[in-house]
Image: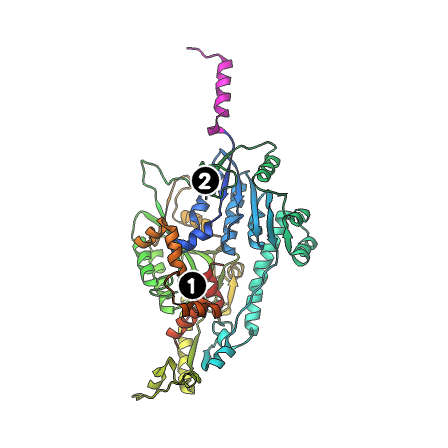
């Protein structure tokens, strides 16, 4: 049967006009992600699925561009950078982005600046304050309470206990955190200048003169390109494409989506039905380096070793978000990484922070990558001795004891040890700290293949940004979780055209799965409503819960040597900011 050329062309036109072949925009709706993370698993994993959706859309011929809906989104500075990087890769395929913002700070605006057009809600507010670094000090409060603290510190930059023994920053802290602040501020400044084609003078004026912008003033100052909501986004896309785009698909929250579509878009599946895909294991190590709490090093180390022995697992990506804590817990993870590396590639992806004990856990990896905003390094250890300096007397308590051994009374007391260290005891602690510090630096030298002198030059507890750590030789590359996965694929020699499964660990427990299914109950339980005593709520009014948690953590380990950051970073991590 013959088909005339006219009918054939008509058929092709109809097929090409069908929505299956039409050019679409993907609405990447990241609203409510922060809330969802807070009421789900305590693992606080990054949104790996979001990265995979962006990657799929980049190679999808039907997806012309992305509507980046971040009007109600909040995340860490490091994770926002990772998302921006992923969207830059999306654009490298010749595709376009239109961002929609409402209330945004400089970090969220930096993410939005990846877009070809930025649309701002007409009731929105843009805050361009810049960056600051502050520390809190409780020396005088402890003195008034009758609590004494001896800071056992023998390394220039290891300042984790300064908040208990000082009332202002030391010169070493001003130097190291000033350099960190310079690195991250300069990166954000350069990113915004390049994205919006601003001069130095324009950027300085926006930051230092205006700094608070309504939608009207943001439009006047060229911070955004349009003002409005869904219709303004549609008009911005028309300007980008030169024609209207009417087909949209959605990834994210369906209730708050901007373009009113219900067509869902998911990440690509791994492999095919005829062949089992190789596995890249994504392992999350979040929180303080502690055997049972935080990253739960005992269980985590066992998981890493088990994955190392699984044939189908071709590589391991260890995502570390940790301010440090216990040296033995950090070493437990480091040794598991060393064991696994002998069998397959282990790539560490540093999140918001992977410093002190967090760096210890990372140092044996095949490859270490970090974002420019990551805080890392702090190779060093510290200790403190909290003791009764009048507290018991003020409370009306008294203590009496018997002892066998010249130093046994160090362990006696009510609430706190009854006395300070004497000169001989402090000398013994100094020797202990130097021994553990020597172990730390030697292990870094072995794990990183560095001369011990080079390690010592960047140690002493000094912190670095990701960029600074790269210059110091403490990491191998700048990148986020997607880049770490790509590096793992290459080291495992998995071809680019072969699918891979990304399995995440630790697996959620039954109770976490149940809370995922009933988020309202999870929010109630994790908010503490209904079961926290009134006294605890009153205490929270005066001192935040992370401060209590950190002080009690240190008191439980009174006198122990710890690779840990100052409370500022423990609290920051707990808050997810």
- Callout 1 secondary element: helix
Residue lying furthest right: 201
Q: In this view of the protein, can residue 566 be seen by the observer? A: no
Residue lying furthest top: 1
Answer whether residue 19 is magenta in the image: yes
Q: Is residue 269 above or below residue 84?
A: above
Q: Could you tell me if the residues under marks 1 and 2 are in contact, i.e. CB atoms within 8 Å? A: no
Q: Residue at x 41, y 68 (%)?
A: 534
Image coords of residue 244 (percent x, y): 58, 32
Q: Main secondary structure of the magenta part?
A: helix
For the residue pair 472 and 135, the one nearer the viewer reads as: 135
Image coords of residue 366 (percent x, y): 41, 56
For the residue pair 535 and 166, the one nearer the viewer reads as: 535
Q: Residue at x 54, y 48 (%)?
A: 71
Q: Residue at x 35, y 37 (%)?
A: 272
Q: Is residue 73 left or right of residue 207?
A: left
Residue 548 numbered mark, or none: none
Q: Few, some or many C-alpha atoms within 10 Å of disc 1 (few <14, some 14-19, many ≥20)?
A: many
Q: Which residues are magenta?
A: 1-21
For the residue pair 227 and 462, the one nearer the viewer reads as: 227
Judging by the rendered image, the residue that carries numbered circle 2 is: 56
Find residue 408 and report its image quarter.
bottom left
Between the C-alphas of marks 1 and 2, the distance is 32 Å
Q: In this view of the protein, can residue 408 be seen by the observer? A: yes
Q: How many marks?
A: 2
Q: Few, some or many C-alpha atoms within 10 Å of disc 2 (few <14, some 14-19, many ≥20)?
A: some
Judging by the rendered image, the residue that carries numbered circle 1 is: 358
């Amino acid at each position: 049967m013959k088909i005339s050329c006219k009918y054939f062309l008509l058929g092709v036109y109809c097929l090409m006009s069908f929505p299956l072949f039409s050019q679409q925009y993907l609405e990447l709706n990241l609203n409510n992600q922060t809330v969802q993370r807070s009421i789900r698993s305590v693992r606080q994993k990054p949104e790996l699925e979001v990265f995979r959706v962006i990657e799929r859309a980049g190679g999808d011929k039907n997806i012309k561009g992305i509507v980046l809906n971040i009007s109600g989104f909040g995340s860490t500075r490091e994770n926002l950078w990772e998302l921006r990087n992923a969207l830059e890769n999306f654009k490298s395929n010749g595709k376009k982005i239109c961002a929609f913002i409402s209330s945004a700070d400089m970090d969220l605006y930096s993410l939005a600046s990846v877009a070809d057009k930025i649309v701002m809600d007409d009731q929105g507010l843009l805050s361009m304050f810049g960056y600051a670094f502050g520390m809190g000090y409780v020396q005088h409060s402890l003195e008034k309470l009758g609590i004494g603290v001896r800071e056992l510190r023998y390394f220039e930059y290891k300042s984790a206990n300064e908040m208990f023994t000082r009332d202002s920053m030391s010169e070493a802290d001003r130097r190291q955190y000033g350099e960190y602040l310079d690195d991250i501020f300069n990166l954000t400044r350069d990113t915004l200048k390049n994205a919006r084609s601003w001069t130095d003078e324009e950027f300085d004026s926006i930051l230092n003169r205006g700094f608070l912008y309504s939608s009207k003033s943001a439009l006047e100052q060229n911070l955004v390109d349009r003002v409005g909501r869904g219709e303004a986004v549609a008009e911005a896309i028309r300007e980008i494409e030169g024609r209207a785009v009417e087909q949209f698909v959605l990834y994210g929250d369906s209730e708050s989506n901007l373009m009113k579509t219900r067509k869902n878009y998911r990440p690509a599946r791994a492999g095919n039905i005829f062949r089992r895909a190789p596995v890249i294991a994504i392992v999350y190590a979040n929180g303080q380096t502690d055997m049972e709490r935080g990253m739960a090093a005992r269980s985590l180390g066992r998981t890493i070793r088990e994955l190392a022995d699984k044939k189908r697992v071709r590589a391991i990506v260890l995502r570390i978000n940790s301010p440090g804590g216990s040296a033995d817990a950090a070493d437990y993870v480091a040794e598991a990484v060393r064991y696994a590396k002998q069998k397959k590639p282990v790539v560490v992806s540093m999140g918001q922070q992977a410093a002190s004990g967090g760096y210890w856990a990372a140092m044996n990896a095949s490859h270490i990558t970090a974002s420019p905003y990551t805080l890392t390094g702090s190779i060093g250890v510290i200790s403190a001795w909290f003791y009764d300096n009048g507290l018991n007397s003020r409370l009306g308590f008294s203590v009496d004891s018997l002892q066998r051994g010249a130093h046994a009374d160090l362990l006696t007391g009510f609430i706190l040890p009854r006395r300070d260290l004497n000169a001989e005891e402090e000398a013994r602690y100094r020797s202990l700290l130097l021994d553990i510090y020597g172990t730390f630096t030697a292990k870094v030298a072995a794990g990183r293949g560095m001369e011990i002198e080079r390690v010592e030059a960047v140690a002493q507890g000094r912190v670095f940004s990701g960029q600074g750590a790269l210059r110091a030789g403490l990491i191998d590359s700048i990148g986020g979780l997607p880049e770490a996965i790509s590096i793992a694929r290459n080291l495992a020699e998995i071809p680019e055209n072969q699918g891979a499964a990304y399995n995440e660990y630790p697996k959620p427990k039954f109770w976490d799965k149940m809370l995922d299914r009933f988020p309202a109950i999870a929010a109630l339980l994790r908010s503490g409503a209904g079961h926290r005593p009134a006294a605890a709520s009153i205490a929270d009014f005066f001192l935040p819960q992370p401060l209590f948690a950190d002080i009690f953590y240190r008191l439980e380990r009174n006198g122990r040597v710890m690779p840990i950051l100052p409370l500022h970073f423990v609290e920051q991590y707990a808050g997810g900011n």
